[in-house]
């Protein structure tokens, strides 16, 4: 899987909502009494309505006629009133047992008609009123039994008028109010049982109206407020029980307003804040109950502000911060409950700051960090429970820093590290639960450093390491639980480093190693669980070294080995459970090395070996037929 796809998948799996946050409050008006004309206004003469009241009309300009009304037991919804300019007529309403919804009234300028309203049992929803400029008509409300939603009111410049509001049982959502410059009016709120979302308010410059807020019972979300420069106004905030998301605030430079925040019960995500130069406001944060993501903050030079952070219960992702040079401010961090991913931070020089970590309980990925030269910052790391991926770090010269690591629970991938000289940093690695992939490391010459590996549960792929001359370093390896593939290593001359290898459970592939002259290092190989494929190795003259192999449980393919003269190294081979194909080996002269072969379970193909006498191929076929072979035979284009 491409690493970007992997990262997208990981982020998608995290329990962070990034779409519009909505309260549990339904957008659908409740059924009840409906007013859609002046006659309906005049007909309502009582002081109370036991159920819901819906005002929905394209004719009414005011609500005169409702002056006797004091109490509504259910919801009051004023919606889609295209001509409504004033709420005059509701002047005596003191209590609403349900929610108050004022939505999509394009001519409504103010809420002064609600100036007597004191109690609201449900939510307060003020949404998509294009002419609304203020909320001063709500100045008597002290409690909202549900959520407060102020959303997409284009001309709303201020929300003062809510100063007496102290208790909100649900969420507070201030979203998409294009003219809103401040949150003055919310000063009475100390605690929220729900979450707080401040999003897409393109004129919002400060959060000063939240200066008394101490505790948020769910999420804190500050997103895409394009002129917000700082978070001043949140200085009293000590705890957020859920996630904290600071995303896409184009001019936000610092998180200084979060200086008292010590507890984050969920995840912390700081992402795509193009002007962010410091995380200093997080200085008191010691633990994060979920994940920590620092992503795509293009001018962030370091993680100043996280110096107190000791514990992350979830995943740590540091991704795509192009100016980030140092992780040193993570120096107290000693626990990560999930993955550690450090990806595409082009200026990152060092992993110093991660030196207290002794175990990664998930995956470890160091990928695409162009300036990173070593892994010394991981010097206490002893175990990775998931996969270990070190890939496309072009300046990485050494794996020192992993020298205490003894086990990897998943796949070990070393790919595209063009300056990597050796693998000595892995010298204590003894336990690898899955596959080993070493690919496209341009100046890597051998595998010294893997000398403690004795048994592998997965497979091995050594591919396109242009300077690899030897597999020395695998000299203790006796068992490969998967497939062993050695492909396209142009300088590899022999396999002596595999001299103790006895068992390969899922096949052996030797392909495109143009300097490979010998397979003598495979002299201990006695069990091969899958195919044996040897092809496109132009310097290989003999198969001497496979003399312990008696059974191939898959297919045997010898193809396009330009220098191969004979197959003498297969002298002990007695059984091939699959097909046998010998083809396009220009210099092959003899099949005498297959003298003990008694069984081929599939097809037999010997063709286009220009120097192999057809009689030798025919003799092998006849001997197999005499032994009971019944498969298809194709012998052609060999030497007449």
Image (spheres, rainbow, N blue to C red):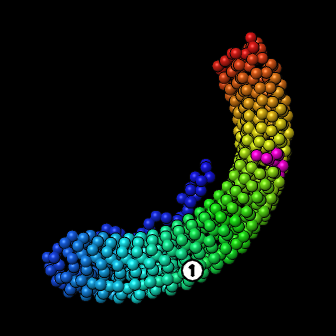
Q: On the image, numbered disc 1 is attached to which residue?
A: 257
The residue under the point 83% across, 25% down is: 568
Q: Secondary structure at mark 1?
A: helix
Measured from the top left, where is residue 300 in percent x and y? Answer: 63, 68
Task: Name the one closer to the observer, 205 or 199.
Answer: 205
Q: Decide: is 263 above or below 462.
A: below
Q: Residue at x 40, y 81 (%)?
A: 159
Q: Is residue 51 left or right of residue 283?
A: left
Q: Give the image quarter of residue 31.
A: bottom left
Residue furthest top in the image? 640
Q: Main secondary structure of the magenta part?
A: loop
* Observer able to see residue 99: no
Q: Is residue 79 magenta?
A: no
Q: Would residue 68 appear left or right of 462 to someone viewing this image?
A: left
Q: Nearer the viewer, residue 217 or 640?
A: 640
Q: Is residue 606 above or below residue 230?
A: above
Q: Which residues are magenta?
A: 442-450
Going 34% across and 68% down the picture, which residue do you hit? 27
């Amino acid at each position: 899987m491409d690493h970007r796809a992997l990262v997208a998948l990981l982020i998608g799996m995290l329990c962070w909502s990034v779409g519009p946050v909505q309260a549990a409050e339904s957008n659908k008006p409740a059924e009840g009494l409906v007013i859609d004309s002046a006659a309906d206004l005049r007909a309502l003469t009582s002081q109370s309505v036991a159920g819901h009241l819906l005002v929905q009309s394209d004719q009414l300009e005011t609500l005169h006629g409702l002056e006797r009304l004091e109490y509504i037991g259910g919801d009051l919804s004023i919606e889609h009133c295209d001509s409504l300019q004033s709420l005059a007529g509701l002047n005596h309403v003191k209590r609403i047992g349900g929610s108050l919804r004022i939505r999509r009234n394009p001519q409504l300028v103010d809420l002064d008609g609600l100036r007597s309203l004191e109690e609201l049992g449900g939510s307060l929803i003020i949404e998509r009123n294009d002419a609304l400029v203020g909320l001063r008509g709500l100045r008597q409300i002290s409690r909202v039994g549900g959520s407060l939603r102020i959303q997409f009111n284009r001309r709303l410049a201020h929300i003062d008028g809510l100063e007496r509001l102290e208790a909100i049982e649900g969420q507070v959502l201030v979203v998409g109010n294009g003219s809103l410059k401040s949150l003055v009016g919310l000063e009475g709120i100390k605690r929220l049982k729900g979450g707080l979302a401040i999003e897409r308010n393109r004129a919002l410059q400060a959060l000063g109206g939240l200066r008394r807020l101490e505790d948020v019972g769910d999420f804190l979300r500050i997103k895409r407020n394009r002129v917000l420069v700082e978070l001043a106004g949140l200085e009293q905030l000590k705890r957020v029980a859920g996630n904290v998301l600071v995303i896409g605030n184009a001019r936000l430079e610092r998180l200084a307003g979060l200086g008292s925040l010590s507890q984050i019960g969920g995840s912390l995500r700081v992402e795509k804040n193009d002007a962010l130069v410091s995380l200093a406001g997080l200085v008191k944060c010691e633990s994060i109950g979920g994940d920590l993501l620092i992503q795509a903050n293009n001018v962030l030079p370091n993680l100043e502000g996280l110096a107190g952070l000791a514990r992350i219960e979830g995943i740590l992702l540091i991704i795509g911060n192009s100016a980030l040079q140092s992780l040193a401010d993570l120096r107290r961090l000693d626990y990560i409950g999930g993955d550690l991913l450090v990806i595409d931070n082009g200026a990152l020089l060092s992993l110093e700051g991660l030196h207290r970590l002794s175990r990664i309980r998930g995956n470890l990925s160091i990928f695409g960090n162009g300036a990173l030269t070593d892994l010394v910052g991981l010097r206490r790391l002893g175990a990775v429970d998931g996969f270990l991926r070190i890939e496309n770090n072009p300046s990485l010269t050494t794996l020192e820093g992993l020298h205490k690591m003894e086990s990897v629970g998943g796949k070990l991938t070393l790919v595209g590290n063009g300056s990597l000289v050796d693998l000595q940093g892995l010298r204590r690695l003894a336990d690898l639960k899955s596959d080993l992939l070493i690919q496209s490391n341009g100046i890597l010459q051998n595998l010294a450093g893997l000398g403690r590996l004795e048994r592998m549960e997965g497979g091995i792929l050594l591919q396109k390491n242009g300077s690899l001359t030897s597999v020395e370093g695998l000299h203790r390896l006796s068992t490969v639980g998967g497939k062993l593939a050695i492909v396209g290593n142009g300088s590899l001359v022999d396999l002596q480093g595999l001299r103790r290898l006895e068992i390969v459970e899922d096949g052996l592939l030797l392909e495109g190693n143009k300097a490979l002259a010998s397979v003598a290092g495979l002299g201990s190989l006695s069990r091969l669980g899958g195919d044996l494929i040897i092809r496109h190795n132009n310097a290989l003259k003999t198969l001497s070294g496979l003399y312990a192999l008696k059974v191939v449980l898959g297919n045997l393919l010898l193809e396009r080995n330009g220098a191969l003269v004979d197959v003498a190294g297969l002298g002990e081979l007695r059984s091939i459970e699959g097909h046998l194909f010998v083809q396009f080996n220009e210099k092959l002269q003899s099949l005498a090395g297959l003298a003990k072969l008694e069984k081929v379970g599939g097809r037999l193909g010997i063709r286009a070996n220009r120097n192999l006498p057809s009689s030798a191929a025919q003799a092998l076929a006849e001997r197999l037929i005499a032994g009971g072979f019944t498969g298809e035979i194709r012998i052609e284009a060999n030497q007449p």
